[in-house]
């Protein structure tokens, strides 16, 4: 198994866990769990592959990805009640999934010889869109849009670190650097309250 395949499998599994946790908060049945988990798990990677014109899409080429997502959904269906705060577990699993999915997207784009701008965008798309789809479908406030939190910013920074690292480090080390930067920024936002400034409206001047 290549590093890119390993990253895709890890991303699918962890994002599927988050999708199933959101399904538990919405009190869906086991089929709903599997659907939301699968949507979350492959959403970002599907968008990446469609935009990069990869044929077939990664989970069509290897249906085992869907099996991994469904297995994660079943696991959460029978264990979600054990967690004192499913929202807290969801938030941290999502941070971990982001840190795995961004280098997966970056690695695929780099392997395809894409322009650095496209590499950045594919890292962000792979990391962010599965969770966005999950939250929209389940009528949750998207984590990616939480006020001022470092989410998309963490993904951009991680992808940028990978691009810089790729110039001086082996590909695998650059992707590990990407994962580390993404997770540190996202977890710092959760633990220390790191934020971007947000727009505050002001009364119009007379």
Image (cartoon, rainbow, N blue to C red):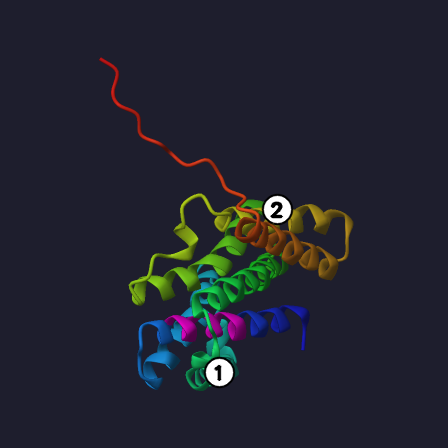
Quadrant that contains the N terminus: bottom right
Quadrant that contains the C terminus: top left
Check disc 2: other Cα within 10 Å, few if <14, some if 14-19, many if 20+: many
Q: Quadrant of residue 8?
A: bottom right
Viewer-nearest of labels 2 and 1?
Answer: 2
Tell which circle, 2 or 1, labels the residue nearer the N-terminal end.
1
Judging depth in this view, the residue of 172 and 134 nearest the camera is 134
Rendering coords of residue 162 (x, y %): 66, 51
Q: Is residue 164 above or below residue 198?
A: below
Question: Does residue 21 belong to the magenta stretch?
Answer: yes
Task: Please tell me whether the stretch drawn in magenta is mainly helix, strand or loop.
Answer: helix
Rendering coords of residue 57 (x, y %): 47, 71
Question: Does residue 91 belong to the magenta stretch?
Answer: no
Residue 56: tell me if it is visible: no
Q: Please name the residue that numbered disc 1 is placed on.
A: 63
Q: Residue at x 43, y 80 (%)?
A: 81
Q: Which mark is residue 160?
A: 2
Judging depth in this view, the residue of 96 and 58 nearest the camera is 96
Horizontal relation, residue 108 to residue 76: left or right? right
Q: Secondary structure at mark 2?
A: helix
Magenta region, residue range: 12-22
């Amino acid at each position: 198994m290549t590093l890119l395949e390993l990253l895709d499998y890890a991303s699918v599994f962890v994002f599927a866990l988050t999708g199933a946790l959101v399904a538990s908060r919405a009190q869906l049945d086991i089929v709903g769990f599997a659907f939301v988990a699968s949507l979350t798990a492959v959403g970002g990677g599907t968008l990446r592959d469609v935009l990069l014109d990869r044929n077939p899409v990664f989970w069509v080429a290897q249906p085992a990805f869907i099996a991994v997502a469904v297995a994660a959904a079943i696991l959460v269906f029978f264990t979600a009640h054990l967690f004192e705060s499913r929202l807290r577990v969801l938030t941290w699993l999502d941070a971990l999934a982001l840190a795995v999915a961004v280098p997966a997207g970056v690695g695929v784009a780099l392997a395809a010889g894409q322009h650095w701008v496209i590499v950045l965008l594919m890292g962000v798309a792979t990391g962010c869109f599965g969770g966005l789809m999950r939250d929209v479908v389940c009528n949750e406030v998207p984590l990616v849009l939480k006020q001022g939190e470092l989410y998309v910013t963490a993904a951009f920074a991680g992808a940028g670190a990978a691009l810089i690292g790729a110039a001086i480090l082996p590909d695998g080390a650059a992707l590990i650097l990407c994962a580390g930067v993404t997770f540190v920024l996202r977890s710092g936002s959760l633990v220390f309250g790191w934020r971007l400034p947000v727009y505050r409206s002001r009364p119009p001047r007379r």
